[in-house]
Image (spheres, rainbow, N blue to C red):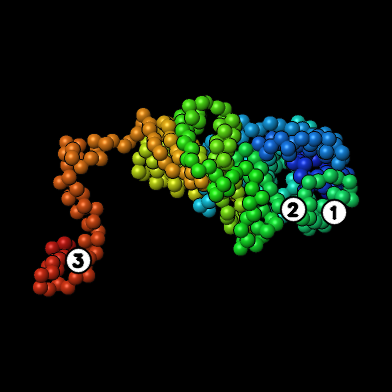
């Protein structure tokens, strides 16, 4: 719903989630023209790369912003968002490692903090009215400070395509890197890079190799496998190949290793929260390795029931993350459950990377539940095989009763039960 002139006039200062890309570049002059407000640009460094951050302040000021505030959130992103995601095991619709989804609540949280810092009465974002990000940004703002007004230009303005946005930028002398010819929509951060639009709008088209940014094609990956060892402490990855790193650096190291070996490419037709399907291609090399390694060590140290229930919780965790419900009681409760399971998730996983494949090559933990003397068929002092007979009889009792109920009561069949003795006088 478009705001009235009176509502627009009441907004004095807006903090815009600013990337310097096409959409947010044209939003700055549009806000000034349509709301007559001061625009403060906020840029969150979540690992999108220096090329996206270079000259950002100059560009923001040139487009009409009063200032640009930038926060380096890479370590917070890794420790407080990516590592909980790894511990949860959350994967959306069997493929998507939630790279864009998990970054949005962090960016929105700092957007609210900056609004408080500069005394703004509104925030704005460049998410379209057809996507998930509008929900993620706005639910986070609502959860943290519902007093702040929210402006979503894509739901108000006359711009209806990226071509329109490029024309608007040209009319206002705003330099942008997007072109009509090469018009992929990308989102990059420490965890992944996503690709949408262009030829991907037809799911029959195979992604072109030139589109990929951080991963080598499996065909061009080295002919020799590369081994990598990852150490975990209570579910948290702490070292790669024996070298300890900060959370963000650890992800960066594995991005380089995984990308060189063609790891982490995903092509997905996903169900957006708003109801339509979309086609996206994702590169998540380090994240794919970490998720795989974490699963491996959990298999070794978690009991059957905990592991089974954790898989159920992971589905809900993925849904909440995808839907923008990070700052909710249920998300906090699942986090608490996950953290409670992670104590024994300590040890080292060795993986072999080869042309896009991850192959298990060894695992060890001081809390391993695997015991060779328990598993061997030769040790009767730990496991008496004759005990299995009684277990199977009880485990299959319901199947036996069901089958007996269908058999005729004649010949060699079981005698029909006499329930008369159970009748009351």
Q: Nearer the viewer, mark 1 or mark 2?
A: 2
The picture places residue 248, in percent across and down from the top left corner, at 59, 32
Q: How many marks?
A: 3
Query: Which residue is depicted at the point 27% across and 36% down?
Result: 372
Residue 10 visible here: no
The picture places residue 81, in percent across and down from the top left corner, at 58, 37
Callout 1: few (<14), some (14-19), or many (20+) C-alpha neighbours within 10 Å?
some
Q: CA distance from mark 2 to mark 3?
A: 69 Å
Query: Which residue is depicted at the point 36% across and 29% down?
Result: 366
The picture places residue 60, in percent across and down from the top left corner, at 82, 38
Callout 3: few (<14), some (14-19), or many (20+) C-alpha neighbours within 10 Å?
some
Task: Give the residue at mark 1.
Answer: 167
Q: Nearer the viewer, mark 2 or mark 3?
A: 2
Callout 2: few (<14), some (14-19), or many (20+) C-alpha neighbours within 10 Å?
few
> Which mark is first along the chain, 3 or 2?
2
The picture places residue 164, in percent across and down from the top left corner, at 82, 56
Task: Give the residue at mark 2.
Answer: 182
Q: Quadrant of the N terminus?
A: bottom right
Q: Give the quarter of the image for residue 301.
A: top left
Residue 408, above or below 288: below
Residue 229 visible here: yes
Q: Give the quarter of the image for residue 409.
A: bottom left
Query: Which residue is depicted at the point 69% across and 37% down?
Result: 49
Provide the secondary structure element on which disc 1 rests: helix
Task: Give the residue at mark 3.
Answer: 404
């Amino acid at each position: 719903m478009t705001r009235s002139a009176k509502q627009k006039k009441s907004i004095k200062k807006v903090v815009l989630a600013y990337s310097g890309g096409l959409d947010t570049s044209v939003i700055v002059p549009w806000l000034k023209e349509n709301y007559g407000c001061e625009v403060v640009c906020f840029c969150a460094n979540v690992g999108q790369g220096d090329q996206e951050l270079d000259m950002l302040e100059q560009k923001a000021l040139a487009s009409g912003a009063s200032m640009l505030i930038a926060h380096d959130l890479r370590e917070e992103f890794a420790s407080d968002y990516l590592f909980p995601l790894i511990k949860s095991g959350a994967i959306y619709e069997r493929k998507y490692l939630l790279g864009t989804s998990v970054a949005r609540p962090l960016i929105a949280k700092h957007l609210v903090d900056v609004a408080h810092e500069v005394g703004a009465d509104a925030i704005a974002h460049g998410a379209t009215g057809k996507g998930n990000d509008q929900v993620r940004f706005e639910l986070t703002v609502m959860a943290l400070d519902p007093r702040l007004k929210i402006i979503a230009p894509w739901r108000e303005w006359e711009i209806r395509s990226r071509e329109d946005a490029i024309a608007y930028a040209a009319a206002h002398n705003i330099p942008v890197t997007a072109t009509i010819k090469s018009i992929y929509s990308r989102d990059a951060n420490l965890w992944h890079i996503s690709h949408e639009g262009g030829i991907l709008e037809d799911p029959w088209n195979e992604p072109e190799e030139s589109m990929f940014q951080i991963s080598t094609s499996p065909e061009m990956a080295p002919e020799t496998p590369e081994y990598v060892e990852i150490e975990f402490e209570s579910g948290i990855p702490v070292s790669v190949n024996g070298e300890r790193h900060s959370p963000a650096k650890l992800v960066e190291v594995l991005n380089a290793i995984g990308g060189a070996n063609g790891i982490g490419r995903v092509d997905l037709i996903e169900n957006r929260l708003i109801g339509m399907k979309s086609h996206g291609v994702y590169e998540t090399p380090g994240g794919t390795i970490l998720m795989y390694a974490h699963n491996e060590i959990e298999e070794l140290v978690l009991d059957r029931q905990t592991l089974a229930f954790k898989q159920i919780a992971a589905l809900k965790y993925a849904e909440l993350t995808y839907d923008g419900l990070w700052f909710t009681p249920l998300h906090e409760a699942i986090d608490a459950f996950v953290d409670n399971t992670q104590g024994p998730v300590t040890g080292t996983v060795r993986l072999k990377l080869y042309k896009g494949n991850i192959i298990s090559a060894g695992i060890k933990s001081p809390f391993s539940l695997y015991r060779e003397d328990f598993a061997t068929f030769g040790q009767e002092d730990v496991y008496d095989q004759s005990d299995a007979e009684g277990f199977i009889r009880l485990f299959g009792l319901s199947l036996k009763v069901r089958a007996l109920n269908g058999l005729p009561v004649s010949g060699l069949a079981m005698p029909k039960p006499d329930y008369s003795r159970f009748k009351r006088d």
